[in-house]
Amino acid sequence: MKRIYLVMLAMLFTAAAFAQIEAPVKWSYAAKKISATEAVVLVKATIEPGWHIYSQNLKDGGPVATSFTFTPAKNYTAMGKPAEPKAITKYEDSFKMNVSYFENSVVFQQKVKLKGAGATTVKGKVEYMTCNDRKCLPPDEVEFSVSVK
């Protein structure tokens, strides 16, 4: 009887080892100062082959659009909405509509107005949804912090 429990326990651990969380998108962040009072925060998504993330500019009724929230701070102000490159736009049968998305990698650029001399840290979060040709993962949020020197 003890042996049966040990075998079942070993099978459970083996199954758990193969059930890994999928994370097809990796995020990286940087900033560059463009003047004494302005900087650009760069938010890059590196996307595994076969997967894609969606544009910020989607109609209602489809996938979750990528969105950014910048934490309010006294030493910077986000200027407008993050810029994004031209997206791929195609009809997706799963949403019964045209959607815009990015494959491989994409860099979003957010201009910020600096309100003082010295280093500043821009903080925020990005919410996104990723899909491939078989499935979509639930929307995810990633917090970030970028130093502007």
Image (spheres, helix red, strand yellow):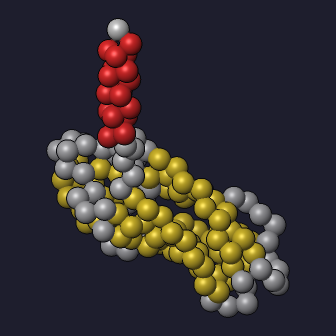
At 34% from the left and 63% from the top, the residue drawn is: 47
Specify the quadrant that holds the C terminus.
bottom right
Q: Nearer the viewer, residue 98 or 34?
A: 34
Task: Give x and y (percent) for residue 3.
Answer: 34, 16
Q: Describe residue 83's horizontal placement relative to residue 145 as left or right.
A: left
Q: Describe residue 136's horizontal placement relative to residue 74 as left or right.
A: left
At 52% from the left and 49% from the top, the residue drawn is: 141
Specify the quadrant that holds the N terminus.
top left
At 48% from the left and 64% from the top, the residue drawn is: 27
Compared with 92, 45 (above or below) is below
Task: Give x and y (percent) for residue 114.
Answer: 74, 78
Q: Which residue, as the protein is rendered here, is positioned at the far bottom?
A: 35
**Residue 58 in sight from this viewpoint:** no
Q: Nearer the viewer, residue 40 or 62?
A: 40
Compared with 35, 90 (above or below) is above
Task: Give x and y (percent) for residue 57.
Answer: 39, 59
Q: Nearer the viewer, residue 110 or 50?
A: 50
